[in-house]
Amino acid sequence: MTDFADDHELAAWAATSAGELLLDVRRQGLEGRALKDAGDMAAHEHLMKVLAEHRPDDAILSEESWRGTESAHDRSLTDRVWIIDPLDGTREFSEPPRDDWAVHVALWQRGAGDGSGGLGDLVAGAVAQSALGETFHTGRPPLVPPSSSSRTRIVVSRTRPPAFVEAFAAEIDAELVPMGSAGAKVMAVVRDVADAYIHAGGQYEWDSAAPVAVARAAGLFTSRVDGSPLRYNQDDVSLPDLIVCRPELSETILEFVRRHGTD
Ligand SMILES: Nc1ncnc2c1ncn2[C@@H]1O[C@H](COP(=O)(O)O)[C@@H](OP(=O)(O)O)[C@H]1O
Ligand SMILES: [Mg+2]
Protein backbone atom coordinates (compact mmCIF):
# COMPACT_ATOMS: atom_id res chain seq x y z
CA MET A 1 0.00 0.00 0.00
CA THR A 2 1.22 3.51 -0.83
CA ASP A 3 2.02 5.60 2.23
CA PHE A 4 2.01 8.91 0.31
CA ALA A 5 5.12 10.34 1.99
CA ASP A 6 5.18 12.93 -0.80
CA ASP A 7 2.66 15.79 -0.52
CA HIS A 8 2.42 16.21 -4.32
CA GLU A 9 1.56 12.55 -4.78
CA LEU A 10 -0.97 12.64 -1.95
CA ALA A 11 -2.64 15.72 -3.43
CA ALA A 12 -2.82 14.04 -6.84
CA TRP A 13 -4.22 10.79 -5.51
CA ALA A 14 -6.74 12.50 -3.22
CA ALA A 15 -8.07 14.68 -6.05
CA THR A 16 -8.15 11.81 -8.56
CA SER A 17 -9.99 9.43 -6.23
CA ALA A 18 -12.52 12.12 -5.27
CA GLY A 19 -13.08 12.78 -8.97
CA GLU A 20 -13.74 9.10 -9.63
CA LEU A 21 -16.25 9.11 -6.80
CA LEU A 22 -17.94 12.09 -8.45
CA LEU A 23 -18.25 10.18 -11.73
CA ASP A 24 -20.02 7.41 -9.74
CA VAL A 25 -22.37 9.97 -8.16
CA ARG A 26 -23.19 11.26 -11.63
CA ARG A 27 -24.31 7.74 -12.63
CA GLN A 28 -26.86 7.48 -9.79
CA GLY A 29 -29.71 9.10 -11.74
CA LEU A 30 -29.96 12.25 -9.61
CA GLU A 31 -30.66 15.65 -11.13
CA GLY A 32 -30.41 19.35 -10.32
CA ARG A 33 -30.01 20.35 -6.68
CA ALA A 34 -29.98 16.72 -5.49
CA LEU A 35 -27.08 15.90 -7.83
CA LYS A 36 -25.16 19.05 -6.80
CA ASP A 37 -25.58 18.32 -3.09
CA ALA A 38 -24.70 14.62 -3.44
CA GLY A 39 -21.53 15.53 -5.37
CA ASP A 40 -20.38 18.30 -3.01
CA MET A 41 -20.95 16.10 0.02
CA ALA A 42 -19.43 12.86 -1.31
CA ALA A 43 -16.23 14.54 -2.48
CA HIS A 44 -15.89 16.60 0.72
CA GLU A 45 -16.31 13.61 3.04
CA HIS A 46 -13.89 11.54 0.95
CA LEU A 47 -11.18 14.21 1.04
CA MET A 48 -11.63 14.85 4.78
CA LYS A 49 -11.18 11.12 5.42
CA VAL A 50 -8.14 10.74 3.16
CA LEU A 51 -6.37 13.78 4.62
CA ALA A 52 -7.19 12.87 8.23
CA GLU A 53 -5.77 9.41 7.61
CA HIS A 54 -2.56 10.45 5.83
CA ARG A 55 -1.89 13.89 7.39
CA PRO A 56 -3.56 13.82 10.85
CA ASP A 57 -1.65 16.87 12.13
CA ASP A 58 -2.62 19.23 9.31
CA ALA A 59 -5.58 21.61 9.22
CA ILE A 60 -8.10 21.62 6.35
CA LEU A 61 -9.94 24.55 4.83
CA SER A 62 -12.80 23.21 2.69
CA GLU A 63 -15.64 24.95 0.88
CA GLU A 64 -18.05 22.36 2.28
CA SER A 65 -17.03 22.22 5.98
CA TRP A 66 -20.14 24.17 6.96
CA ARG A 67 -22.33 21.15 6.27
CA GLY A 68 -19.99 18.19 6.74
CA THR A 69 -16.95 17.03 8.68
CA GLU A 70 -14.89 19.93 10.01
CA SER A 71 -11.12 20.26 10.28
CA ALA A 72 -9.70 18.72 13.47
CA HIS A 73 -7.21 21.61 13.75
CA ASP A 74 -7.34 25.40 13.85
CA ARG A 75 -5.70 26.63 10.64
CA SER A 76 -4.37 29.76 12.37
CA LEU A 77 -2.26 27.55 14.65
CA THR A 78 -0.91 24.84 12.34
CA ASP A 79 2.02 25.19 9.93
CA ARG A 80 0.30 23.21 7.20
CA VAL A 81 -3.19 23.75 5.80
CA TRP A 82 -4.88 21.81 3.00
CA ILE A 83 -7.13 24.13 1.00
CA ILE A 84 -9.70 22.07 -0.86
CA ASP A 85 -12.66 22.58 -3.14
CA PRO A 86 -14.27 19.14 -3.32
CA LEU A 87 -16.31 20.07 -6.39
CA ASP A 88 -15.52 23.26 -8.28
CA GLY A 89 -18.04 23.95 -11.00
CA THR A 90 -20.91 22.31 -9.15
CA ARG A 91 -23.38 23.80 -11.63
CA GLU A 92 -21.60 22.23 -14.62
CA PHE A 93 -21.21 18.90 -12.77
CA SER A 94 -25.01 18.79 -12.55
CA GLU A 95 -25.33 19.19 -16.33
CA PRO A 96 -23.96 15.93 -17.82
CA PRO A 97 -22.07 15.40 -20.05
CA ARG A 98 -20.30 18.74 -19.39
CA ASP A 99 -16.67 18.24 -18.39
CA ASP A 100 -15.85 21.70 -16.98
CA TRP A 101 -15.80 20.80 -13.29
CA ALA A 102 -12.89 19.75 -11.08
CA VAL A 103 -11.62 18.62 -7.69
CA HIS A 104 -9.06 20.95 -6.07
CA VAL A 105 -6.52 19.88 -3.43
CA ALA A 106 -3.77 22.34 -2.40
CA LEU A 107 -1.32 22.52 0.47
CA TRP A 108 -0.28 25.80 2.10
CA GLN A 109 2.75 25.91 4.36
CA ARG A 110 3.76 28.57 6.86
CA GLY A 111 7.10 30.21 6.04
CA ALA A 112 7.10 29.03 2.42
CA GLY A 113 7.44 31.33 -0.58
CA ASP A 114 9.52 34.34 -1.53
CA GLY A 115 8.66 37.79 -0.40
CA SER A 116 5.83 36.69 1.85
CA GLY A 117 7.74 37.75 4.95
CA GLY A 118 7.58 34.18 6.17
CA LEU A 119 3.80 34.26 6.09
CA GLY A 120 3.53 31.20 3.92
CA ASP A 121 2.50 30.07 0.47
CA LEU A 122 1.18 27.18 -1.60
CA VAL A 123 3.66 24.28 -1.84
CA ALA A 124 1.64 21.57 -3.62
CA GLY A 125 -1.56 21.27 -5.60
CA ALA A 126 -3.66 18.98 -7.76
CA VAL A 127 -6.65 19.60 -10.02
CA ALA A 128 -8.55 16.51 -11.13
CA GLN A 129 -10.70 16.89 -14.23
CA SER A 130 -12.19 13.44 -14.06
CA ALA A 131 -14.58 13.90 -16.97
CA LEU A 132 -11.46 14.44 -19.11
CA GLY A 133 -9.61 11.57 -17.39
CA GLU A 134 -6.81 13.95 -16.33
CA THR A 135 -5.23 15.12 -13.08
CA PHE A 136 -2.83 18.05 -13.28
CA HIS A 137 -0.47 18.33 -10.32
CA THR A 138 2.73 19.85 -8.97
CA GLY A 139 4.47 16.47 -8.62
CA ARG A 140 4.75 16.39 -12.40
CA PRO A 141 4.22 19.99 -13.54
CA PRO A 142 2.46 20.15 -16.89
CA LEU A 143 4.38 21.45 -19.91
CA VAL A 144 2.46 24.32 -21.48
CA PRO A 145 2.77 24.06 -25.28
CA PRO A 146 3.35 27.19 -27.37
CA SER A 147 0.05 28.95 -28.10
CA SER A 148 -1.72 27.25 -31.01
CA SER A 149 -3.83 30.33 -31.76
CA SER A 150 -2.87 33.57 -33.46
CA ARG A 151 -5.84 35.24 -31.76
CA THR A 152 -5.65 35.58 -27.95
CA ARG A 153 -8.25 33.41 -26.16
CA ILE A 154 -9.48 34.48 -22.72
CA VAL A 155 -11.52 32.06 -20.59
CA VAL A 156 -14.18 33.65 -18.40
CA SER A 157 -16.97 32.50 -16.14
CA ARG A 158 -19.81 31.02 -18.13
CA THR A 159 -22.41 32.57 -15.82
CA ARG A 160 -20.61 35.67 -14.44
CA PRO A 161 -18.17 37.05 -17.06
CA PRO A 162 -16.74 40.36 -15.76
CA ALA A 163 -17.69 43.34 -17.96
CA PHE A 164 -14.14 44.75 -17.95
CA VAL A 165 -12.82 41.51 -19.49
CA GLU A 166 -15.27 41.92 -22.36
CA ALA A 167 -13.97 45.48 -22.86
CA PHE A 168 -10.37 44.25 -22.70
CA ALA A 169 -11.09 41.50 -25.24
CA ALA A 170 -12.66 44.06 -27.59
CA GLU A 171 -9.60 46.32 -27.27
CA ILE A 172 -7.06 43.64 -28.17
CA ASP A 173 -9.40 41.70 -30.50
CA ALA A 174 -9.33 38.61 -28.29
CA GLU A 175 -11.84 35.80 -28.28
CA LEU A 176 -13.83 35.14 -25.06
CA VAL A 177 -14.23 31.46 -24.15
CA PRO A 178 -17.00 30.91 -21.55
CA MET A 179 -16.43 27.94 -19.25
CA GLY A 180 -17.50 26.72 -15.80
CA SER A 181 -15.18 26.05 -12.84
CA ALA A 182 -12.11 28.09 -11.87
CA GLY A 183 -10.01 24.91 -11.96
CA ALA A 184 -11.18 23.99 -15.45
CA LYS A 185 -10.42 27.53 -16.64
CA VAL A 186 -6.90 27.59 -15.20
CA MET A 187 -6.25 24.14 -16.70
CA ALA A 188 -7.59 25.48 -20.03
CA VAL A 189 -4.62 27.88 -20.00
CA VAL A 190 -2.29 25.02 -19.04
CA ARG A 191 -3.75 22.88 -21.88
CA ASP A 192 -3.53 25.61 -24.55
CA VAL A 193 -7.31 25.80 -24.87
CA ALA A 194 -6.91 29.43 -23.78
CA ASP A 195 -4.12 31.96 -23.22
CA ALA A 196 -5.50 33.74 -20.15
CA TYR A 197 -8.12 33.46 -17.42
CA ILE A 198 -9.27 36.71 -15.86
CA HIS A 199 -11.84 36.95 -13.08
CA ALA A 200 -13.20 39.60 -10.71
CA GLY A 201 -16.31 40.12 -8.62
CA GLY A 202 -16.03 37.28 -6.11
CA GLN A 203 -14.35 33.97 -5.35
CA TYR A 204 -12.83 32.22 -2.35
CA GLU A 205 -9.38 30.78 -1.61
CA TRP A 206 -10.49 27.21 -2.41
CA ASP A 207 -11.64 28.22 -5.90
CA SER A 208 -8.10 29.15 -6.98
CA ALA A 209 -5.53 27.61 -4.56
CA ALA A 210 -4.91 24.26 -6.27
CA PRO A 211 -5.22 25.60 -9.83
CA VAL A 212 -2.81 28.44 -9.02
CA ALA A 213 -0.29 26.00 -7.48
CA VAL A 214 -0.38 23.94 -10.69
CA ALA A 215 -0.24 27.03 -12.93
CA ARG A 216 2.81 28.39 -11.10
CA ALA A 217 4.57 25.02 -11.34
CA ALA A 218 3.84 25.08 -15.09
CA GLY A 219 5.51 28.50 -15.41
CA LEU A 220 2.36 30.55 -15.93
CA PHE A 221 1.86 34.06 -14.51
CA THR A 222 -0.53 34.40 -11.55
CA SER A 223 -1.62 37.48 -9.58
CA ARG A 224 -4.56 39.54 -8.36
CA VAL A 225 -5.98 41.88 -11.03
CA ASP A 226 -3.99 44.78 -9.49
CA GLY A 227 -0.78 42.77 -9.95
CA SER A 228 -0.35 41.98 -6.24
CA PRO A 229 0.36 38.38 -5.20
CA LEU A 230 -2.43 35.89 -4.50
CA ARG A 231 -2.18 35.09 -0.78
CA TYR A 232 -3.72 32.03 0.85
CA ASN A 233 -4.73 30.90 4.35
CA GLN A 234 -5.75 34.44 5.26
CA ASP A 235 -8.21 35.19 8.09
CA ASP A 236 -10.70 36.36 5.46
CA VAL A 237 -10.88 33.62 2.82
CA SER A 238 -12.47 35.87 0.20
CA LEU A 239 -10.11 36.14 -2.80
CA PRO A 240 -12.35 37.83 -5.35
CA ASP A 241 -10.16 38.30 -8.43
CA LEU A 242 -7.24 36.80 -10.29
CA ILE A 243 -5.24 36.60 -13.50
CA VAL A 244 -3.66 33.37 -14.75
CA CYS A 245 -1.98 33.73 -18.13
CA ARG A 246 0.96 33.06 -20.37
CA PRO A 247 3.77 35.27 -18.99
CA GLU A 248 4.00 37.36 -22.16
CA LEU A 249 0.37 38.55 -21.74
CA SER A 250 0.56 39.71 -18.12
CA GLU A 251 1.75 43.27 -18.72
CA THR A 252 -0.96 43.97 -21.35
CA ILE A 253 -3.68 42.79 -18.95
CA LEU A 254 -2.31 44.64 -15.91
CA GLU A 255 -1.86 47.81 -17.94
CA PHE A 256 -5.50 47.67 -19.09
CA VAL A 257 -6.67 47.29 -15.48
CA ARG A 258 -4.45 50.20 -14.37
CA ARG A 259 -6.05 52.39 -17.05
CA HIS A 260 -9.70 51.31 -16.72
CA GLY A 261 -10.11 49.53 -13.35
CA THR A 262 -12.44 46.54 -13.09
CA ASP A 263 -15.83 48.26 -12.71
N1 LIG B 1 -19.00 36.43 -7.85
C1 LIG B 1 -18.71 35.28 -7.21
N2 LIG B 1 -18.89 35.18 -5.87
C2 LIG B 1 -18.57 34.02 -5.22
N3 LIG B 1 -18.07 32.92 -5.83
C3 LIG B 1 -17.89 32.97 -7.16
C4 LIG B 1 -18.20 34.16 -7.91
N4 LIG B 1 -17.90 33.91 -9.20
C5 LIG B 1 -17.45 32.64 -9.25
N5 LIG B 1 -17.43 32.08 -8.02
C6 LIG B 1 -17.04 30.70 -7.69
O1 LIG B 1 -15.91 30.34 -8.45
C7 LIG B 1 -16.08 29.04 -9.01
C8 LIG B 1 -16.02 29.16 -10.52
O2 LIG B 1 -17.12 29.93 -10.94
P1 LIG B 1 -17.44 30.12 -12.49
O3 LIG B 1 -17.73 28.75 -13.02
O4 LIG B 1 -18.60 31.05 -12.55
O5 LIG B 1 -16.20 30.69 -13.08
C9 LIG B 1 -17.42 28.49 -8.52
O6 LIG B 1 -17.12 27.63 -7.43
P2 LIG B 1 -18.08 26.36 -6.99
O7 LIG B 1 -18.58 25.72 -8.21
O8 LIG B 1 -17.12 25.53 -6.21
O9 LIG B 1 -19.15 26.99 -6.15
C10 LIG B 1 -18.15 29.76 -8.09
O10 LIG B 1 -19.02 29.57 -7.00
MG1 LIG C 1 -15.28 26.43 -6.26
Image (cartoon, rainbow, N blue to C red):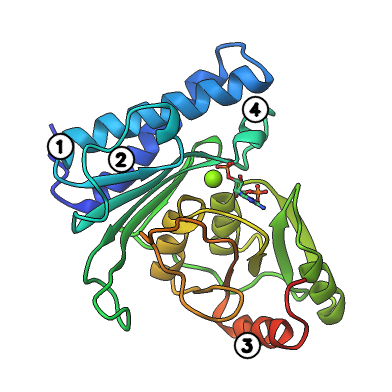
Q: Which residue position is annotated with label 2?
A: 13
**Amino acid type shown at disc 2:** Trp
Secondary structure, mark 4, is loop
**Amino acid type shown at disc 3:** Glu
Residue at 71% from the left image edge and 66% from the top image edge:
154
Q: Which residue position is annotated with label 1?
A: 2
Disc 3 or 2, which lies upstream in sequence?
A: 2
Secondary structure, mark 3, is helix
Q: Which residue position is annotated with label 4?
A: 94
The reply to whether callout 2 and callout 1 are in contact (CB within 8 Å) is: yes
Of the four image quadrants, the one with ligand 2 is top right
- Relative side of 94 to 49, left or right: right
Place of residue 245 in the rendered image (x, y in percent of width and height, measured from the top left): 58, 72
For label 2, the crowd category at 10 Å Cα-Cα, with few meaning under 14, some 14 to 19 and many 20 or more, is some
Residue 145, located in which quarter of the rendered image? bottom right
Residue at 65% from the left image edge and 22% from the top image edge:
33
**Amino acid type shown at disc 1:** Thr
Residue at 60% from the left image edge and 35% from the top image edge:
90
Q: CA distance from mark 4 to mark 3?
A: 37 Å
Q: Nearer the viewer, residue 51 or 77?
A: 77
Q: Is residue 193 visible?
A: yes
Q: Which residue position is annotated with label 3?
A: 251
The reply to whether callout 1 and callout 4 are in contact (CB within 8 Å) is: no
Q: CA distance from mark 4 to mark 2?
A: 23 Å
Q: Nearer the viewer, mark 3 or mark 2?
A: 3
Q: CA distance from mark 2 to mark 1?
A: 10 Å
Residue 253, located in which quarter of the rendered image? bottom right
